Image (spheres, rainbow, N blue to C red):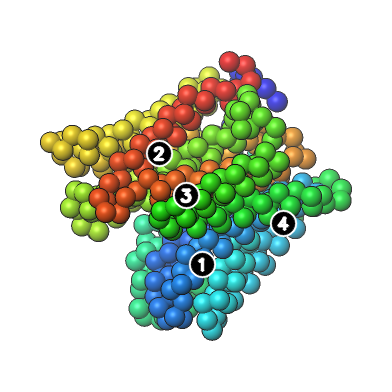
């Protein structure tokens, strides 16, 4: 399909994401995404208490790295499952793995078992991330996809705002196991809402599964794990791990991503590459922004948390704005504008670091701009991916989109760990790296359209 087509089919005023026939799927998808978001945020909040209770501090980093590594396997497997068997079966498999991981972690007698549970959670969440996009994308008509992905973005906001506080309450009041078990209790509810609608979605081609891609997924998973390990270390060992991880991820990406992705070929390959670049820019900047605000500017942890929340809110606002933009010409302008706004916001975040006479609240202004810019552009990549993908390839292409996100973000966070000097607490090189990534995304974004 050519994205130069000038007219987007109009949406009737009565059309809604929650119209009969898709209401349960959309509500279930929002519930599931919110649940995945809360699990990610809450576990990060609770993990220090978990590691202390299980005497597992040596495995602390692996509890996060294992989830990242297995999610890469899940994404790749889900692409095959969705295209060959349909999103319903893929969702069943993802829910089963995710629920099993939550229960295993929630009842873990030691840290080794908890890490195994976290690995299962990563596998399940990787499958679900792809199956949700494909399945609900098939249930919801294409003209409503901008609204759909804006809703998906909004589903992260509430968990981002209340997740840390709620997780702390659960740990203090009921113990750390309640964080995992509370999410496990919500899985059947979300599944009951979503699965019946997905049963009516595409059933796949019925062809035999081709598992040769899983060999490259294993290499990508190993690369992601090495990159994660590199971000936890310092010195020559960290640089060596980073190099090996980057090489493994690059070799695997050449096999797992559509041809032309790594050279930004026009159309779908650029969509997939841009997802990795902008996700990595946001993830690396967000990880170090609290350190900048508290250590460099002297803000309190509460004030730094408000800044992060403000970025989440403006991301949601930007997503809602892009959902209301109609017409191909307007959307062609909006995508590069969103990336450019994100890059400009990162530049503003850095200005009070470079020029100390400037007030530190400019960093908050910049971060609000970053959230708004990514909100304008990020959901559009998902919309464009489904628009450019034949139905029989939506699973594999959605898998590639999320693999790009995971692998480029892993590389950027590992590089951020190498650039950051704990002795000086200097985060400017990390922010500069994020700014470059956002700027490159802005420059490449016109290549999304096949006709320049």
Measured in 3D between alpha carbons, the distance from the residue under mark 4 to the one under mark 3, in whole angstroms, is 37 Å
Q: Give the side of residue 401 with respect to residue 313, left or right.
A: right
Among numbered discs 4 and 1, the one appearing first in the sequence: 1
Q: Is residue 348 left or right of residue 190?
A: left
Tell me which residue sits at (34%, 30%) in the image. 344
Question: Which residue is labeled 4 in the image?
Answer: 90
State the quadrant of the N terminus.
top right
Which mark is first along the chain, 4 or 2?
4
Q: Are marks 4 and 3 in contact (CB under 8 Å)?
A: no
Determine the CA span between mark 3 and mark 1.
22 Å
Using the rendered view, name the quadrant where residue 12 is placed: top right
Q: Earlier in the sequence, mark 3 or mark 1?
A: 1
Q: Quadrant of residue 101?
A: bottom right
- Residue positioned 42% across, 43% down in the render: 282
Check the image and name the residue furthest to the front. 236
On the image, numbered disc 3 is attached to which residue?
239
Provide the residue designation for mark 1.
63
**Label whose residue precedes the other's in the sequence (4 or 3):** 4
Marks 2 and 4 close (CB-CB < 8 Å) = no
Point out the frontmost of discs 4 and 3: 3
Q: Secondary structure at mark 3?
A: helix
Question: What is the spatial separation of the Cα atoms under label 2 and label 4, in whole angstroms?
Answer: 34 Å
Please name the residue that numbered disc 2 is placed on: 434
Label 3 packing within 10 angstroms: few (<14), some (14-19), many (20+): some
Image label count: 4
Q: Secondary structure at mark 4?
A: helix
Viewer-nearest of labels 3 and 1? 3
Q: Position of residue 449 (x, y in %)?
A: 60, 22
Mark pair 1, 2: CA separation: 26 Å
Mark 1 and mark 2 residues within 8 Å of each other at the beta carbon: no
């Amino acid at each position: 399909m050519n994205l130069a087509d000038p007219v987007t089919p109009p949406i009737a005023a009565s059309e809604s994401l929650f119209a009969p026939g898709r209401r349960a799927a959309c509500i279930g998808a929002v519930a599931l995404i919110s649940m995945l978001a809360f699990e990610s945020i809450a576990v990060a909040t609770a993990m220090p208490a978990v590691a202390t209770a299980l005497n597992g501090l040596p495995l602390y980093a692996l509890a996060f790295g294992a989830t990242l590594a297995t999610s890469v396997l899940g994404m790749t497997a889900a692409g095959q499952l969705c295209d060959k068997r349909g999103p319903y079966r893929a969702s069943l498999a993802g829910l089963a793995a995710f629920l099993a991981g939550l229960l295993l972690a929630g009842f873990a007698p030691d840290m080794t078992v908890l890490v195994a549970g976290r690995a299962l959670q990563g596998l399940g969440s990787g499958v679900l991330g792809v199956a949700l996009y494909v399945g609900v994308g098939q249930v919801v008509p294409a003209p409503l996809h901008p609204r759909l992905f804006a809703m998906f973005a909004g589903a992260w906001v509430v968990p981002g705002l209340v997740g840390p506080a709620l997780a702390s309450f659960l740990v203090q009041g009921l113990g750390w196991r309640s964080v995992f078990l509370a999410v496990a209790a919500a899985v059947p509810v979300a599944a009951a809402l979503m699965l019946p609608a997905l049963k009516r979605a595409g059933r796949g081609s019925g062809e035999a599964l081709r598992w040769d891609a899983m060999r490259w997924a294993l290499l990508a998973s190993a690369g992601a794990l090495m990159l994660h390990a590199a971000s936890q270390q310092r010195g020559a060992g960290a640089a060596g791990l980073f190099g090996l991880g980057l090489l493994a991820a690059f070799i695997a990406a050449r096999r797992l991503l559509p041809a032309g992705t790594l050279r930004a070929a026009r159309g779908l390959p650029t969509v997939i590459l841009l997802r990795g670049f902008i996700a990595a820019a946001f993830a690396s900047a967000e990880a170090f922004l609290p350190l900048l605000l508290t250590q460099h500017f002297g803000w309190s942890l509460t004030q730094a948390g408000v800044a992060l929340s403000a970025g989440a809110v403006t991301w949601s606002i930007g997503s809602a704005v892009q959902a209301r933009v109609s017409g191909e010409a307007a959307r062609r302008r909006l995508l590069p504008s969103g990336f450019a706004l994100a890059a400009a916001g990162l530049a503003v975040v850095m200005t009070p670091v470079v020029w100390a006479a400037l007030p530190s609240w400019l960093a908050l202004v910049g971060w609000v701009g970053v959230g708004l810019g990514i909100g304008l552009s990020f959901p559009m990549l998902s919309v464009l991916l489904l628009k450019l993908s034949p139905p029989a390839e939506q699973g594999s292409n959605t898998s590639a989109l999320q693999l790009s996100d995971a692998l480029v973000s892993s590389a950027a966070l590992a590089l951020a760990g190498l650039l950051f000097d704990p002795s000086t607490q200097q985060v400017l090189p990390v922010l500069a790296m994020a700014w470059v990534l956002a700027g490159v995304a802005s420059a490449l974004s016109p290549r999304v359209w096949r006709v320049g």
